Image: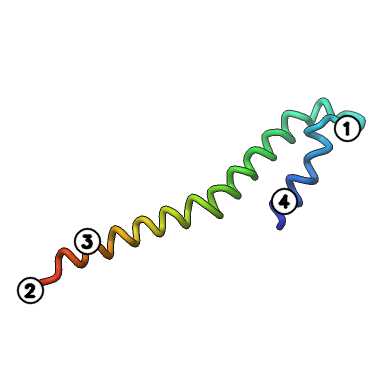
Amino acid sequence: MTALATIFGMLPLAIGVGSGAQMLQPLAIAVIGGVAISILLSLVITPVLFYLLRRHRSSAAVLQEPI
């Protein structure tokens, strides 16, 4: 929620609305991009990697069981 609030708060600067917005426009675009990538990493990529590593670990444990 705070990440989305940050993105929406930076949108007027990224669009260039208001006085002095042209000076801060590159900063706003960089902040929006960074926050969007962090959302993607924390909500999608990290859980998928965790799932894949856990699945790989469990299949390796099954192969190493003594008979």
Residue 26 in the image: x percent, y percent?
73, 29
Amino acid residing under circle 4: Leu
Q: Residue at x 29, y 58 (%)?
A: 56
Which of the two marks, 2 or 1, is nearer to us in this view? Answer: 2
Between the residue at mark 4 and the residue at mark 2, the CA separation in whole angstroms equals 53 Å
Name the outermost residue toward the bottom.
67
* Mark closest to the chain's N terminus, 4 or 3: 4
Q: Do callouts 4 and 2 mark residues in contact (Cβ within 8 Å)? A: no
Q: In this view, does 17 lie to the left or right of 63?
A: right
Q: Do callouts 4 and 1 mark residues in contact (Cβ within 8 Å)? A: no
Q: Residue at x 69, y 39 (%)?
A: 31
Residue picked out by circle 4? 4
Q: What element carries label 4?
A: helix
Residue picked out by circle 3? 60
Q: Is mark 1 on a helix, strand or loop?
A: loop
Q: Do callouts 2 and 1 mark residues in contact (Cβ within 8 Å)? A: no
Name above or below for residue 27 compared with residue 42.
above
Q: How crowded is mark 2: few (under 14 residues within 10 Å), some or many (20 or more)?
A: few
Q: Is mark 2 on a helix, strand or loop?
A: loop
* Mark closest to the chain's N terminus, 2 or 1: 1
Which quadrant of the rendered structure holds the C terminus? bottom left
Residue picked out by circle 1? 17
Q: Please give the label number shown on residue 32.
A: none
Amino acid residing under circle 3: Ala
Name the outermost residue toward the right.
19
